[in-house]
């Protein structure tokens, strides 16, 4: 399939000049990289056990969100996309699609989990974060609520989550399985979940965001230590697409986001972070991924005529139900790790620390030497 980068549709946004200036400043300031401690071998469990009985179900998510809404001190609002007024508002199998908001800030932050139904802990992590943001009176959370309005989507794919599969299943008689994270592309939008969340995205126009996934078990290149979290950008920094978006601002800020999370989480001995790669040594560069389309400023159904876009990153927690590697012991650690990664990114963005990081240090985050780009049309090898 052919893809059309929509760089010409990028609006010049006032804020981008600030990012570019911060990046230039950061380049002039040398900073030392913290060395990560070796990971706990039981995180994630390598024993091949997967317990899905303790994973949050759709019904338990709704119950948990409603409980947080009714008990939180700081204005958590839980609603369905039907209530938000999107034209399409339920999953293929008719489940309501849920969002929770918290905070009163002018800047909007998009946090989504479980677009792949068999990658569970983005859901638990986002519910835990919502609870924290809705109940904590400490200075950091107060600053986050003042600066941002958070749009939290714990379960983007409720049908796949209920069936513990990656996809959603079309209900048009074809029973085709659709990867919702390849569906935000002109000529696609095959699943109704894509239409629904796309429209909500155009209503929100978030300033930045995070998408949380799982990968299988992974070893760090060069050390063979267990990796517990990989940091990804679905349009590769320095790759075929990202440097041309928003005058290069996203190529800078996504690297800074990764550097900041890497540094902040390296002090935890049980966490071992590297850069997300595909097939061992390829950088991912897919245009049909949800957060890719958000960076590309995709205009679908005429709902984004000005080509609004914003920078996005994703997290890949190690362990996956399908691969039988999501041990019970890893549950609490995986969720806690994701919450810490989110908190460090959000507080760093709010304080301006992220924007001061040296984007060049993205190269210091462990990764295999890049041999090519994994695109919608296959692998493009590097010369
Ligand atoms: Zn995934």
Image (cartoon, rainbow, N blue to C red):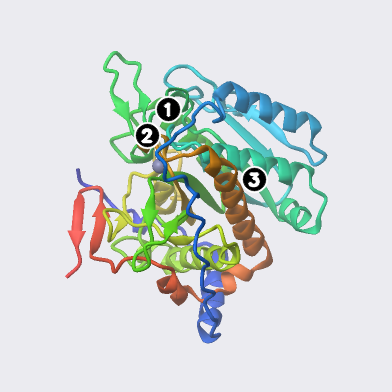
**Taking 1 as reference, is 313 above or below it?**
below
Between the C-alphas of marks 2 and 3, the distance is 30 Å
Q: Are marks 1 and 2 in contact (CB under 8 Å)?
A: yes
Quadrant assignment, res 34: bottom right
- Say which residue label 2 marks: 322
Q: Nearer the viewer, mark 2 or mark 3?
A: 2
Task: Point out residue 90 in the picture as x, y percentages from the top left corner.
Answer: 50, 22
Residue, x 31% and y 50% (percent of image)?
286
The secondary element bearing badge 1 is classed as loop
Task: Point out residue 372 in the picture as x, y percentages from the top left corner.
Answer: 23, 62
Residue nearest the observer in this picture, 159 or 350 = 159
Q: Residue furthest top?
A: 173
Q: Is residue 7 left or right of residue 21?
A: left
Residue nearest the observer in this picture, 275 or 159 = 275
Between the C-alphas of marks 3 and 1, the distance is 27 Å
Q: Earlier in the sequence, mark 2 or mark 3?
A: 3
The secondary element bearing badge 3 is classed as strand
Task: Point out residue 203 in the picture as x, y percentages from the top left corner.
Answer: 55, 39
Q: Nearer the viewer, mark 3 or mark 1?
A: 1
- Say which residue label 3 marks: 150
Ligand 1 placement by image quarter: top left
Between the C-alphas of marks 1 and 2, the distance is 8 Å
Looking at the rendered structure, which numbered label has been put on residue 164? 1
Residue, x 56% and y 69% (percent of image)?
263
């Amino acid at each position: 399939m052919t893809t059309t980068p929509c760089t010409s549709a990028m609006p010049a946004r006032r804020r981008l000049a600030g990012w570019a200036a911060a990046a230039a400043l950061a380049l002039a300031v040398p900073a030392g990289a913290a060395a990560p401690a070796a990971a706990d071998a039981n995180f994630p469990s390598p024993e091949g056990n997967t317990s899905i009985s303790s994973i949050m179900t759709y019904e338990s998510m709704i119950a948990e969100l409603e409980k947080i809404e009714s008990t939180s001190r700081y204005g958590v609002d839980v609603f369905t996309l039907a209530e938000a007024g999107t034209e399409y508002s339920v999953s293929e199998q008719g489940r309501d699609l849920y969002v929770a908001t918290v905070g009163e800030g002018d800047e909007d932050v998009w946090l989504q989990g479980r677009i792949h139904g068999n990658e569970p802990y983005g859901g638990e992590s986002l519910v835990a974060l919502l609870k924290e943001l809705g109940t904590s009176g400490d200075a950091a959370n107060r600053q986050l609520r003042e600066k941002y309005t958070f749009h939290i989507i714990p379960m983007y794919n409720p049908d796949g989550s209920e069936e513990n599969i990656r996809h959603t299943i079309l209900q048009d008689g074809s029973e085709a399985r659709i990867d919702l994270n390849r569906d935000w592309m002109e000529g696609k939008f095959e699943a109704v979940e894509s239409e629904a969340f796309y429209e909500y995205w155009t209503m929100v126009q978030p300033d930045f965001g995070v998408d949380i996934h799982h990968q299988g078990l992974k070893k760090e290149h060069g050390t063979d230590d267990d990796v517990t979290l990989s940091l990804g950008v679905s349009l590769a920094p320095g790759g075929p697409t990202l440097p041309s978006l928003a005058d290069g601002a996203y190529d800078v800020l996504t690297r800074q986001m990764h550097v900041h999370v890497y540094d902040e989480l390296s002090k935890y001995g049980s966490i071992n972070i590297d850069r997300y790669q595909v097939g061992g040594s390829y950088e991912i560069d897919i245009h049909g991924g949800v957060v890719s389309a958000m960076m590309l400023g995709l205009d679908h159904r005429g709902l984004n005529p000005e080509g609004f876009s914003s920078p996005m990153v994703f997290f890949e927690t190690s362990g996956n139900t399908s691969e039988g590697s999501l041990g019970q012991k890893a549950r609490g650690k995986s969720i806690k790790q994701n919450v810490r990664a989110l908190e460090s990114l959000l507080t760093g963005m709010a304080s301006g620390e992220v924007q001061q990081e040296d984007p060049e240090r993205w190269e210091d985050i462990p990764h295999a030497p890049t041999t090519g780009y994994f695109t919608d049309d296959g692998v493009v090898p590097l010369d």
